[in-house]
Amino acid sequence: MLQKRIDDQPSISREMVREAQDILHRHLKRVGLKQTAQRDTILRSFLDTRDHLSTDELHRLVQKKDPSIGYTTVYRTLKLLAECGLASEVAFHDGIARYEHQYNRRSHHHMVCTQCGGSVEFFSPEVSQLEQEIGRRYHYATTRHTFQIYGVCEDCRNKNSAQPA
Amino acid sequence: MLQKRIDDQPSISREMVREAQDILHRHLKRVGLKQTAQRDTILRSFLDTRDHLSTDELHRLVQKKDPSIGYTTVYRTLKLLAECGLASEVAFHDGIARYEHQYNRRSHHHMVCTQCGGSVEFFSPEVSQLEQEIGRRYHYATTRHTFQIYGVCEDCRNKNSAQPA
DNA sequence: TTGAAAATGAAATTCATTTTCAAATAACGC
DNA sequence: GCGTTATTTGAAAATGAATTTCATTTTCAA
């Protein structure tokens, strides 16, 4: 069953990749870690998509560029990217951790189709305001929030009615 | 380290328990399953708290009433309760599935302290409106949403400043 | 009461995630 | 450049929650 994808094209420009790489390198230096070819390759594969990637999916992409890079390294690098703000985890509630790149993107949320797994992004500034407001009310220093909507997309609804099981 | 709890008292009255039991029994009959003492015991333990329980935590509570009931049965019964609307899953993003009872409760959301694991509930009708609105805009038939806020509660902030590591 | 279908619970399995460890590599000082 | 040393790497093992299996027990409709 094919998954609908909103976009396939590489998403950010060459200079943005360079900038992201700089951010990673500075982060590595700051916490006393080393710059490696693997980490750079993984970062570039990661930036080269707009999807919400699981570690496994990113590993497969990375292997096209360098088949010797193992799952573990991808897993660990993804954590590094999250640490320095280049990636952020999005939980689609199906037991698999996904990441998306956060670099130069507006804060947004996701609506996920529970049948095909596809998703759309939407923008909703109200939600961030709510975070502030609720945090103030209960004296929490808030750091982040999650907001996902679940449902069935138009395509899947049509498929359903076409061939009722 | 003690976790702060908002309330400890049993949360619903005797007749509500009876009503919930009826709902479960009707659901079992409808889908051709059988009524058992274990399922009733598990339901009662479940209703007897307001916390957000993991399968494991509920299993421990259930064992106080009947030590012979196993983890598997609790796990399966929790799914049944979710099926008939008596329970609903809440994901706090720590890899453990939790359930809360949904019986006669207003829709609400959670703010979770990332240090002590404590949480407060809050009500925010705006969020449900958003679900409708976004669903309409992208032609999704929405079924539910999740909204959680993460941060650090007042107590934990005070503890932090008292003894800076 | 009885027999077929379902439930039970211990144990085994699954599956994503995380850790371990020995070999390879990066980066610092010389 | 060169050696040293701490870090990185990736395969494999470990972990841990969720789920399934299976032999036994129980429910319930006839």
Image (cartoon, coloured by chain):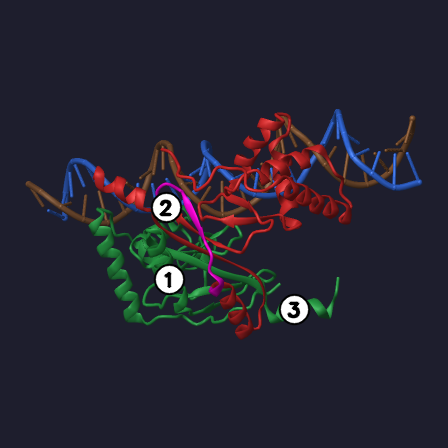
Chain colours: A green, B red, C brown, D blue
State the image coordinates of residue B83 (x, y, percent, origin top left).
Answer: 65, 50
State the image coordinates of residue A148 (x, y, percent, origin top left).
Answer: 49, 60
Q: Nearer the viewer, mark 2 or mark 1?
A: 2
User: Tag 2, which secondary structure?
Assistant: loop
Q: Residue at x 24, y 51 (%)?
A: A28
Q: Residue at x 43, y 72 (%)?
A: A9
Q: Nearer the viewer, mark 3 or mark 2?
A: 2
Q: CA distance from mark 1 to mark 3?
A: 30 Å
Residue A138 colored in magenta in the image: no
State the image coordinates of residue B36 (x, y, percent, origin top left).
Answer: 73, 35
Three-letter code, disc 2 = Thr
State the image coordinates of residue B43 (x, y, percent, origin top left).
Answer: 63, 39
Three-letter code, disc 1 = His
Question: For the residues tagged 2 and 1, is the chain the same?
Answer: no
Q: Which mark is residue A157?
A: 3
**Over which residues does the magenta segment extend?**
B114-126
Q: Quadrant of residue A159?
A: bottom right
- Estimate how packed mark 1 is, as few (under 14), some (14 to 19) or many (20 or more) residues with alpha carbons within 10 Å: many
Query: B51 above or below A97?
Result: above
Q: CA distance from mark 3 to mark 2?
A: 38 Å
Three-letter code, disc 3 = Arg
**Mark 1 sits on what residue?**
A101
Q: Dot 1 falls on which chain?
A: A
Q: In the displayed structure, does residue A24 sit left or right of residue B47?
A: left
Q: Dot 2 falls on which chain?
A: B
User: Tag 1, which secondary structure?
Assistant: strand
Contact check, label 2 and label 1, Cβ < 8 Å: no
**Mark 2 sits on what residue?**
B114
Which image quadrant: the N terminus of chain A? Answer: bottom right
Which image quadrant: the C terminus of chain A? Answer: bottom right
Question: For the residues tagged 3 and 2, is the chain the same?
Answer: no
